[in-house]
Image (tube, grey):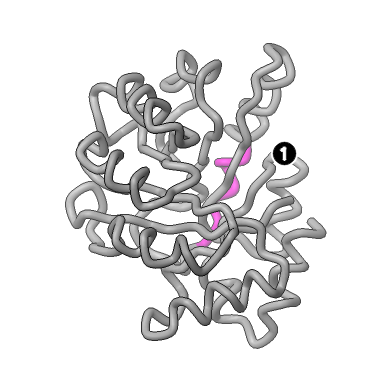
Amino acid sequence: MKVAPSILSADFANLERDVKLVEGYGADWIHIDAMDGQFVPNLTLGANIVKALRPVTDLTLDCHLMVQNPERFIKDFADAGADYIMVHAEATPHIHRAIQQIKQTNTKAGVVINPGTSVAVIKELLPIVDAILVMTVNPGFGGQVFLEHTLGKVRELDALRKEHDYHYLIEVDGGVNGETAKLCSAAGADVAVAGSYVYNSKDIKAAIESIKEA
């Protein structure tokens, strides 16, 4: 399983150091959470952070836009150097158009669903997206407890992928640790986002390895 440490839990005063730290310990992606204070109550990172990090790491930059009407920010994140831009199905009435916009920037496009959103909502997008992010907690804050019922959606997405020969990656985000990563992997997930479990660990290398080995 690929590991995508979320810099939401990193030391913002030493962001380059913390990105290089997890890169050296085997992280595969860097997960960047953009929040607008409207779609979720928190307010965090913008495209300027992506632009700052792009020259200092070769890791995949996975940009998760927890923002209302994400179409407004797609070009900024693409221009900044994002590899994946992930947008919430719940955040725009025109999710198909948003995915098309991302693809027009030659950036990989992903759709995100909250714990209360069913796979049926995004079924028409499955043939065209590069990744699907299943939120395994309610979005907006780090350090939450993993919601085990969300594994059903991971299993459903994996079954649909196999049935129709779709090519999207399945990503999980929220409450991921060495134990819950095993459940996610068994359900069919390919990428695990982990913030506090990695960056708040006394042994960051061991934390990353526990997810990779899941």
Secondary structure type for disc 1: helix
Q: Residue at x 30, y 39 (%)?
A: 74
Camera-nearest residue between 122 and 73: 73
Residue at image coords 39%, 57%: 33
Q: Give whichever of 117, 77 is nearer the camera.
A: 77
158 falls in the magenta region: no
Up-down relation of residue 23 to residue 166 (above or below): below
- Identified at 69% across, 84% down, the residue is 203
Q: In terms of depth relative to the viewer, which is nearer, 182 or 212?
A: 212
- Which quarter of the figure is the C terminus placed in? bottom right
* Whether residue 200 is situated above or below residue 65 in the rendered picture: below
Residue type, label 1: Ala
Asked if residue 17 is positioned above or below residue 130 in the image, the reply reads below
Q: Is residue 148 magenta?
A: yes
Q: Is residue 83 above or below residue 203?
A: above
Which of the two residues, 91 or 98, is positioned nearer the viewer here? 98
Residue 12 picture location, percent across and down: 38, 79
Q: Is residue 204 left or right of residue 175?
A: right
Q: Quadrant of residue 200?
A: bottom right
Q: Position of residue 161 (x, y in %)?
A: 67, 21
List the single residue furthest toward the front: 55
Q: Circle 1 is placed at which residue position? A: 187
Measured as percent of width and height from the top left, residue 116 is found at 41, 37
Question: Quick one: which residue is furthest to the right in this view?
Answer: 213
In this picture, residue 63 sits left or right of residue 36: right
| Left or right of 181 in this view: 92 | left
Position in image of residue 160 (x %, y %): 65, 19
What range is drawn magenta here?
145-151
Q: Which class describes the residues within 10 Å of circle 1: few (<14), some (14-19), or many (20+)?
A: some
